């Protein structure tokens, strides 16, 4: 609180005329744009970043500390040295990054503490990445009945992380895999799942099938078309 007095000199019998002054100084409020950050869906092992703008909504405000509650999937950074005094027109920029490690929703809160407190909620969802392959159709051509022909398919991740949990054929009679694959298998960027597909026709005629790669991505199963012709 502050107090003072104004003395008004005059020629009356009450000279000087005294006016008492008093008031309380209060800290300004803190505000942020946006008031909450939702990162939406982000592939596991990938990251997304947004910038938070913090400012004094009225008067002057001091930010002493800023910190996250707990979640390790969010990180914050700022070029400003704390404590930082924000006056009208000043802006504190805070970079917020979400790098999910789990296939699930995540949430946290940034707490700004100072002359006034400010809470900014954070939300995001870790999702599976995307599968691709070097071929989408394996064409074996003509294969003699009883003989075998092989084509190697390479399945990989183009973004994020994907867990492969099954490998199945539609018919599963004349097509098969010649290599062993231990499942479940987690694929990250740079990993390759090699599938040695074998056609061993038991009879003459066109052989159609599909190899289904069961996984946790948005395209489940991820399928490769198979075709070949058996001849005697």
Image: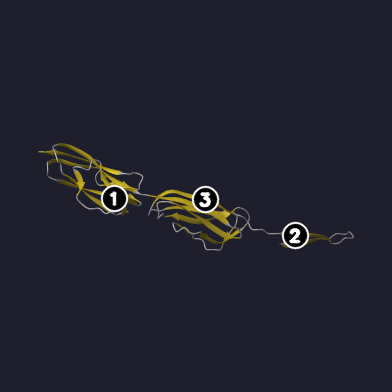
* Residue plotted at (50% across, 56% down): 94
Residue contact between numbered discs 1 and 3, judged by CB atoms under 8 Å: no
Tell me the quarter of the picture where residue 7 sits.
bottom right
Of labels 1 and 2, earlier in sequence is: 2
* Residue plotted at (55% across, 52% down): 32
Q: Secondary structure at mark 1?
A: strand
Give the Cα separation between the discs numbered 2 and 3: 39 Å
**Label of residue 22 in the image:** 2
Asked whether, in this view, residue 100 is left or right of residue 66, the answer is left
Q: At which x and y percent is residue 67?
A: 51, 60
Q: Secondary structure at mark 3?
A: loop
* Residue plotted at (27% across, 47% down): 167
Q: Which residue is mark 1?
A: 156
Q: Work out whether 61 lies above or below 39.
A: below
Give 100 or 169, whichever is nearer the viewer. 169
Question: For the residue carrying disc 3, how many other residues have a C-alpha within 10 Å: few (<14), some (14-19), or many (20+)?
Answer: some
Kindly report which numbered mark, 2 or 3, lies closer to the viewer in this rendering. Answer: 3
Give the Cα separation between the discs numbered 1 and 3: 35 Å
Q: At which x and y percent is residue 191?
A: 29, 54
Question: For the residue carrying disc 1, how many other residues have a C-alpha within 10 Å: few (<14), some (14-19), or many (20+)?
Answer: many
């Amino acid at each position: 609180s502050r107090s003072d007095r104004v003395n008004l000199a005059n020629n009356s019998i009450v000279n000087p005329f005294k006016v008492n002054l008093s008031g309380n100084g209060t800290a300004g409020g803190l505000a942020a744009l946006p008031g909450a950050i939702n990162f939406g869906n982000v592939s596991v092992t990938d990251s997304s970043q947004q910038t938070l703008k913090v400012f004094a909504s009225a008067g002057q405000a001091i930010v002493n500390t800023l910190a996250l509650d707990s979640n390790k999937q969010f990180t914050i950074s700022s070029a400003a040295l704390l404590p930082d005094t924000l006056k009208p027109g000043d802006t504190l920029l805070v970079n917020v990054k979400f790098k999910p490690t789990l296939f699930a929703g995540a949430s946290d809160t940034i707490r700004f503490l100072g002359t006034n407190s400010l809470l900014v909620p954070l939300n995001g969802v870790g999702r599976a990445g995307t599968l691709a392959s070097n071929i989408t159709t394996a064409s074996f051509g003509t294969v003699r009945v009883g003989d075998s022909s092989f084509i190697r398919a390479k399945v990989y991740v183009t973004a994020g992380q994907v867990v492969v949990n099954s490998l199945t054929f539609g018919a599963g009679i004349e097509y098969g895999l010649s290599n062993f694959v231990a499942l479940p298998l987690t694929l990250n960027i740079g990993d390759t799942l090699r599938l040695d597909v074998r056609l061993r026709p038991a009879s003459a005629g066109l052989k159609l099938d599909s190899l289904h790669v069961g996984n946790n991505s948005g395209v489940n199963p991820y399928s490769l078309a198979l075709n070949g012709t058996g001849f005697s």
